[in-house]
Image (spheres, rainbow, N blue to C red):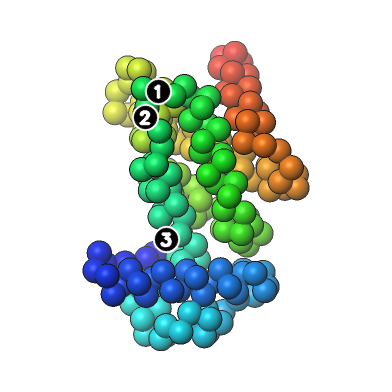
Amino acid sequence: MFHIKPDKRSQTSAALLVDGLYQCMKEKPFSSITITDVQKASTVGRATFYRLFDALPDVLEYQCDLIFGRIIENYPSLTDSSAYDALVFFFREWMEQELLLNAIFTSNHLEILYGVFRKYAPMIRAILSPDANLTEEEVNYAGNFISLGMVGTLESWMKEGKERTPEELADFFQKTIETVYLSF
C-alpha cells in the first residue's frame, strides 16, 4: 500500500521514486529490481521509501492510480462521446503505459491493475453507460465486470505482442460484451 500525503515534499519524493523505478525497469525486469536499486536511481533515502510505500509493487500501484485519475480527469465530455469512443480513449491511454503494464503482467501483479480499475469502477460504468438506471449495488457489479474485462483485454494485447490498435481493442471488448449478453 502507498501512503502519499498531499504535501509537496511527499509527492516530490514519490515522483522521484517512480522515476527511479522506471529507470530500473528499462534496464531489467521488475522481478529483479530491488528497493536499493530504486533508491539509488531516485536519490531518495530508504527511510523515505518506507514512509511512502510498504513494498516495491506499491510504487506500481501508486503510478496506476495516478494514471487512472489523470485519464478520468482528461476524458472528454461525457455528453459528446459514445461508449465506444470512451473505450478507444481508455485503451489508447493505457497502451501508452507499456513499460508499467509490462512490469505488472510479467511479475504477475495483476491485482494492482484490477484493484485500481475496481477503485474507479463506478466512474468507468458511468462513462460507458451514463443513462443506465441502476441501483448502487448494480453499479458496483457492472463497474467491476467492465473493469475486469478491460484489464483482461489489456493483458491479451500484451501477450499477443502489442500489435492491435485502441480501436481494435475496443472492438474486441464490445464484441465480448455483446456475446456475454446474448448468451443469457
| Residue beneath the point at 43% across and 44% down | 71
Is residue 60 rendered to the left or right of residue 32? left
Q: What is the crowding at mark 3: few (fewer than 14 residues within 10 Å), some, or many (at least 20)?
A: many
Q: Distance between the residues labelled 1 and 2?
A: 5 Å
Secondary structure category for the residue under label 1: helix
Residue 80: assigned label: 1
Q: Nearer the viewer, residue 110 or 75?
A: 75
Tell me residue 99's x, y (percent). 61, 59
Secondary structure category for the residue under label 2: loop
Contact (Cβ within 8 Å) of mark 1 with mark 2: yes
| Residue beneath the point at 40% across and 29% down | 127
Residue 171 lies, with reference to residue 19, above or below; the image says: above
Q: What is the crowding at mark 1: few (fewer than 14 residues within 10 Å), some, or many (at least 20)?
A: few
Quarter of the image with the N terminus in it: bottom left
| Residue beneath the point at 36% across and 18% down | 132
Q: Which residue is disc 3 drawn over?
A: 62
Q: Distance between the residues labelled 3 and 1?
A: 30 Å
Tell me residue 123's x, y (percent). 36, 35
Q: Residue furthest left?
A: 7
Q: Which of 175 and 9 is in front in this view?
A: 9
Q: What residue type is labelled 1?
A: Asp
In the rendered image, which quarter is residue 92 located in?
top right
| Mark nearer the N terminus (3 vs 2) | 3
Tell me residue 47's x, y (percent). 37, 85
Q: Which residue is disc 2 drawn over?
A: 77
| Mark nearer the N terminus (3 vs 1) | 3
